[in-house]
Amino acid sequence: MKLKLAFAAASMLVAPAFMSAQAQTSGVYVSGGYTQFNGDGGADLGAVTGRVGVNITPNIAIEGEGSFGVKGDSGTDLDSEFGAFVVAKLPLSPSFDLFARVGASRIETSPGGSQDGVAYGAGGTFNLTPIDGIRADWTRHDYDAGNADAYSLSYVRKF
């Protein structure tokens, strides 16, 4: 129940940031790519992942993500994963940023059903241009039924 409340609270924090971002001309970013989920039980599941984020300050952002399964393993399929995160960024140069993130996520698998959990991770973004980049990250998802490590590679576009 606490995880459901945390997920709902994180979702409510993300929504106003996205709505207020419509009036801004910068600070919004989107990304799309592939995520490999490796579960404790040995299942390796693949997904297409999309993210939308808003930079609150140069070092803090809020982002939401959604993943949809494209590769199952041993009778297990990933239906979806949704998460909301607070992201701390450390720009090392105009070409490279490091980041850490923490939030809540919900995963749905077949069979298995839905699980809510805490998610945290780290990664980096290589900025090809001032508005285009490549992002690589790792996120640990802690669920009651077990844990999953997610490794992502994405294209990022800043607005």
Image (cartoon, rainbow, N blue to C red):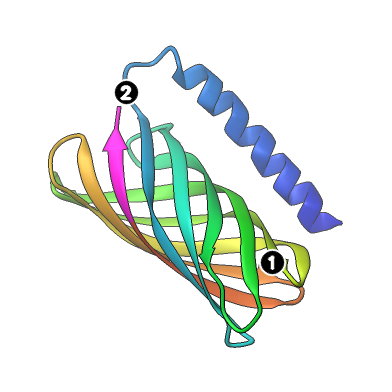
In the displayed image of the protein, which residue is found farthest to the right?
A: 1
The type of residue carrying mark 1 is Thr
Q: Which residues are magenta?
A: 154-159
The residue indicated by pointer 2 is 26
Q: CA distance from mark 1 to mark 2?
A: 36 Å
Disc on res. 109: 1
Amino acid type, label 2: Ser
- Specify the quadrant of the image occupied by residue 15: top right
- SS at circle 1: strand
Q: Residue furthest bottom?
A: 42
The local secondary structure at tag 2 comes to loop
Identity of the residue drawn at 22% across and 46% down: 133
Question: Mostly what secondary structure, the magenta segment?
Answer: strand
Q: Position of residue 155 (x, y in %)?
A: 29, 48
**At 46% across and 52% down in the image, what residue appears?**
49
The residue under the point 29% across, 33% down is 158
**Residue at (57%, 79%) from the top-left corner?**
73
Which labelled disc corresponds to residue 11? none
Question: Residue 63: image x %, image y %?
Answer: 49, 42
Judge from the rendering whether residue 60 lies leftward or rightward of residue 141; answer left or right. Answer: left
